Amino acid sequence: MLKTYNQKNEVVLTFKVGGLYAESTTTNKHEKTFVNKATKKAQPKKNQDVQEFSEIDKGLFPLLTPPKKRHPEYLAVLQNAFWQLEHEKAPKDDLLKLLMYFSPKVRLSESSPTESTIFAITAKEYAALTGLSLRGAYTALNRVVDALYEHSVIFQSQERGRVRTRLVTSAGYQDGRFTVSFTHYALYIMYVFSKETPFTQLHLKSISALHGHGLRLYPFLVQNAFRQDFDIALSDLKVALELSPTSYPEYRDFKSTILKPHIDLINEQTELSVQFRAVKKEGRKASHVGFTISLKKDVTPKQPESKEPPEQPPEQPPEEKEKPSVEQDEQQYAIQFVLDTLKAKNLYDRFKEGNESKVQVMSRILTDMKEGRHIYWQEKIKEFTHSIPLGLDGIGNR
């Protein structure tokens, strides 16, 4: 199966051929708990405009600079923005896990990934990570590939407001190999990590062992593990777990149904050691939950037992796609350099015509560059910055 779509999310072609290293750079250690303001439960207002992801957004979320830290391959590393996405359809566990499994593949790319870069995971890899039999891995991948392709998310952009994007541009499954190409924004939150783009590291083996609300509780605990001991309001914790603030009005029900079973599993299967307690700050009823978190010493999360059958079907490499020409590659780098520098140096006013907004300036320049004037704009921007675009300096990695 292979699916592609254009910028309007219209299907162009469809045919079928078959993760302590707890790190969070988000919170002030002495002030507040990191809470993922997940918005799955919140339905957007009908009169609230949602913009489709466009070429302009690519300039707002650049991929040009590779991450300074590569991070070990046994970790899934995602920007915290990932946990704040609004999912148009609630993602199932296998979809979330598959994105985690692809994280090191994207992060450790030899060159900066693009929307045409193909990433692959085999049924054998998936079986080893999940503990499924090889046959079960085939079945699961065949199901999740469709779900991943159809999945759309909405994020909040300071410049453009609410923006909708898919997570993949194409997906395929054939002969035990699942291939996928990610959209620009998905690559951005899986590849670009800095003080401006805070992120969280998760053990892949820990992710594999969890399910349901545990897949939300574990990242929350990792993000706050550096605080060691802290309290959080029940309502905020429910938001972090993508529950309605009014759900489980009785603490004992919340404890027995959500907290205890999932924390027991986290203590058993992950690198974290977690204790929790009810905290009464607003009267006689529990209003907060207190957590005490520590890291186990020299403990590796348990690996799911694999039930692999003796025979394995042959695996074939994904179909190779035609590589872009040198001219196309240079144009892409020039365009990315110009858009990155416009945003980083805030040069919009220098090139504004009339009452143009920042987005309109970027759109006009982008169109001009795509029509062949990318060298002109590259040199024009360099006059103001004395910079040289990555990969085109005669010294870089091209």
Image (cartoon, rainbow, N blue to C red):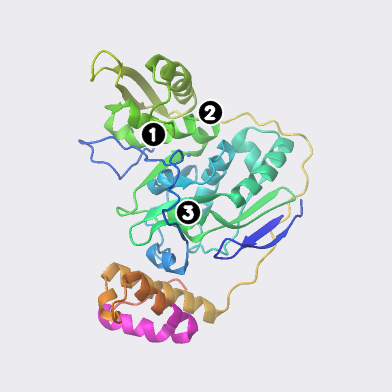
Mark 1 residue crowding within 10 angstroms, few (<14) / some (14–19) / many (20+)? some
Outermost residue, front direction? Answer: 47
Looking at the rendered structure, the kind of residue marked 3 is: Arg
Badge nearest the viewer, 2 or 1: 1
Q: Which residues are magenta?
A: 367-385
Residue 110 in picture, x, y percent from top left: 51, 61
Q: CA distance from mark 1 to mark 3?
A: 29 Å
Element type at marker 2?
loop
Q: Secondary structure at mark 3?
A: helix
Left or right: 16 in relation to 48: right
From this viewpoint, is residue 393 visible? no
Give the residue number, with chain letter if any, for mark 3.
107
- Label located before the other in sequence (2 or 3): 3
Callouts 1 and 3 close, C-beta under 8 Å: no
Which mark, by number, is residue 239?
1
Residue positioned 27% across, 77% down in the render: 385
Read off the residue under disc 2: 302
Q: Which of the two discs, 2 and 1, labels the residue nearer the N terminus? A: 1
